[in-house]
Amino acid sequence: MIKGIACHAIWSEDAKKLGAFYRDVLGLKQTFMEGEDPAESEAMGYYAFDGGNDTWVGLGTHSEVKGRASDPYRHMLGLLVDDVKAEHERLKAKGVEFIEEPTEYGGGSWIATLKDPEGNLIQLFQMP
């Protein structure tokens, strides 16, 4: 029986560059497993970020991944935020490219969609 989502993994040719974007630009909290050496984890090309509710976003270097995402609409990482408009402004000021400005989808739900440096799509969700 499936009980929920544990991780959303994104593979990259250069996880170090992508990891810096998720940590330094998006502001996700980098996490490490108990006893894990952060320097060793980064040397291996793997980054984990707190996804909330005992989940994580994993970024790793993969030998079969080259360049930018060829089909960025195939999957999207969704991140919960308190205020989509404020996050949109904060990230735009840092040069992040948005393909969808903050849009209300009814009932107080808002979504904005952005691209990471490799073209992967990320949606910011504000739920009522």
Image (tube, rainbow, N blue to C red):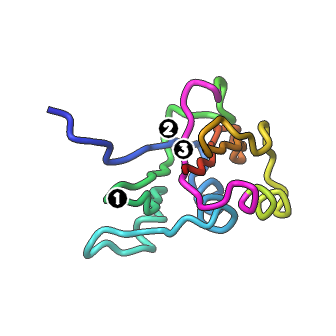
76 in the magenta segment: yes
In the visual, does 49 lie left or right of 128? left
56 in the magenta segment: no
Q: Earlier in the sequence, mark 2 or mark 3?
A: 2
Amino acid at dot 3: Gly
Q: Marks 2 and 1, Cα distance to the nearest angstrom?
A: 30 Å
- Foreground pick, 77 / 31: 77
**Marks 1 and 2: in contact by CB < 8 Å?**
no
Instruction: Determine whether 3 is above or below 24 in the image.
Output: above
Query: Which residue has dot 2 on it?
Result: 63
Q: Position of residue 114 (x, y in %)?
A: 72, 44
Q: Residue at x 63, y 26 (%)?
A: 73
- Using the image, tell me which numbered label, if any, was put on residue 26: none
Q: Marks 2 and 3, Cα distance to the nearest angstrom?
A: 25 Å
In the visual, does 11 lie left or right of 67? left
Q: Position of residue 27 (x, y in %)?
A: 62, 67
Q: Residues within 10 Å of mark 1 (few under 14, many from 20)?
A: few
Q: Earlier in the sequence, mark 2 or mark 1?
A: 1
- Foreground pick, 18 / 66: 18
Q: Earlier in the sequence, mark 3 or mark 1?
A: 1
Q: Residues within 10 Å of mark 2 (few under 14, many from 20)?
A: few
Query: Which residue has dot 1 on it?
Result: 53
Q: Residue at x 59, y 47 (%)?
A: 125
Which span of residues is magenta-colored? 72-87
Amino acid at dot 2: Ser
